[in-house]
Amino acid sequence: MSERAAPFFCPYCGDEDLRPSEAGHGAWECHGCRRAFQLKFLGLLSATNHGGASHEQHRD
C-alpha cells in the first residue's frame, strides 16, 4: 500500500506549516491561519467530462 500525498500549502492562506489533525482521515491543521480543513478524493474524471462546469460566461 502506498503512502497518501500530503498537501503542501494551506488552501486558505498559502502557509506551509500544516500538520495532520486528530479530527480524522484527511484532516489537516494550518498553524499559520489556525484553520482546520479536510481533503477528500472524489474520483477520476472521464475523458469526455471535464468537470461538468462550463467555462463560458453567460450574459443577459
Image (spheres, helix red, strand yellow):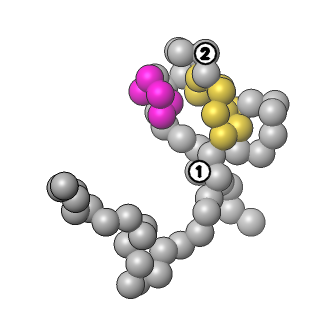
**How far is disc 1 from disc 2 in space, using C-alphas?**
21 Å
Q: Quadrant of residue 28?
A: top right
Front position among marks 1 and 2: 2
Which residue is at a point 42% across and 27% down the rendered structure image? Answer: 14
* 12 within the magenta span: yes
**Residue denoted by label 2:** 34
* 36 within the magenta span: no
User: Among all residues in the image, which is located at the extreme left?
Assistant: 59
Q: Residues within 10 Å of mark 2 (few under 14, many from 20)?
A: few
Relative placement, left or right, of 53 versus 23 is: left
Relative placement, left or right, of 56 versus 53 is: left
Q: Position of residue 38 (x, y in %)?
A: 66, 40
- Identity of the amino acid at label 2? Arg
Which residue is at a point 70% across and 44% down the rendered structure image? Answer: 26
Q: Position of residue 37 (x, y in %)?
A: 64, 33
* Secondary-structure class at tag 1: loop
The circle on residue 17 is none
Which residue is at a point 38% across and 84% down the rendered structure image? Answer: 48
Q: Position of residue 24 (x, y in %)?
A: 81, 40
- Identity of the amino acid at label 1? Ala
Residues rendered magenta in the picture:
10-14
* Secondary-structure class at tag 2: loop
Q: Position of residue 52 (x, y in %)?
A: 42, 70
Q: Residues within 10 Å of mark 1 (few under 14, many from 20)?
A: few
**Residue denoted by label 1:** 5
